[in-house]
Image (spheres, rainbow, N blue to C red):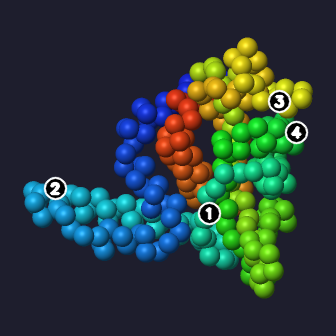
Amino acid sequence: MSRRAPPSKLREQLSNDDESSNDEEDEVSSSPSSAEGDDDAVDDTEDLPDDFVHIQKNINCERRRRQSGRVHGIQDLLPFPFSPLIRPLTISDLESCVALESAAFPNPAHRCSRDKFIYRLTACPELCMGVFCTVVPSNTRGWEIDTLYTAHTVETGRVNAAVSVLLAHIVATRSHDDVVTDDAMSRPRDNVTARSSELKLGHQETGRTVCLHSLAVHPKLQGVGMGKLIVKAYMQQMKSSELADRVALICRET
């Protein structure tokens, strides 16, 4: 049985988690130089108290240490370099989303259906996000993941046939309600986006609540921070885009 979790207000949550938000900028970046940026930056702290400067440097060092640990945790599970690309999903990602959802949720009753994926990726792709990694099939060393077989080539005609593999995704819609309702989880029969508050089913174009319907991480990459990476990136995106006032989701009782 599902129970509705209270909505998380973006301004409230993110303003109370400034350090975590800053961590995400380091975590999402795939450039090694970005992790060293604090050391190469111009030192503008000479006018600040010595104690403050010391504390700030300790914070920066700890931040890099935690970021390094998370990336290495994921990298330990992969036989190829982990260089994440976080981008919005589109309808072209349909097959990868279906494959990932099936792998992440063994119980079919807990999965987003193909029809709902089609509807949501068409009606509101700006609310859907995926974590991808470039993979050269010949370099996987026998390591397999369901979404490898549905991945698109990175570049047409590329000699090594590299593909962009989906590792985690978030799929959502907007609603006028403060929590995720059964109507929000449904879709209109004709897949038409609701632009009036009188139309209750599915995505509400003018709604101010983002309803997370699917948060999926491939089982082979669970427990190493992949879910945290995509959720924090998603929250930052919602805050900067000002598309909503809150993000809500449902959870199952354990």
Q: Residue 162: x and y, percent?
A: 75, 76
Q: Which mark is residue 52?
A: 2
Distance between mark 4 and mark 3 Cα atoms = 13 Å
Indicate left or right for 30 with 132 as reference. Answer: left
Q: Residue 218: x and y, percent?
A: 72, 56
**Which of marks 1 and 3 precedes in the sequence?**
1
**Between 132 and 251, the one nearer to me in the picture:** 132
Nearer the camera: disc 3 or disc 1: 3
Q: Which secondary structure lies at badge 3?
A: loop
Q: Residue 117: x and y, percent?
A: 81, 42
Q: Are marks 1 and 2 in contact (CB under 8 Å)?
A: no
The residue labelled by disc 1 is 85
Identify which residue is drawn at 89% across, 29% down.
Answer: 190
**Which of marks 3 and 2 precedes in the sequence?**
2
Q: Which secondary structure lies at badge 4?
A: helix
Distance between mark 2 and mark 3 Cα atoms = 55 Å
**Which of marks 4 and 2 precedes in the sequence?**
2
**Between 4 and 253, the one nearer to me in the picture:** 4
Distance between mark 3 and mark 1 Cα atoms = 30 Å
Q: Which secondary structure lies at badge 2?
A: helix
Distance between mark 4 and mark 1 Cα atoms = 26 Å
What amino acid is labelled 4 in the image? Asp
152 lies above or below 126? below
The residue labelled by disc 4 is 115
Nearer the camera: disc 2 or disc 4: 4
Specify the quadrant that holds the N terminus: top right
Q: Are marks 4 and 1 in contact (CB under 8 Å)?
A: no
Nearer the camera: disc 2 or disc 3: 3
Q: Is residue 211 visible?
A: yes
Instruction: Classify 10 Å Cα crowding around label 2: few (below 14), some (14-19), many (20 and above).
Output: few
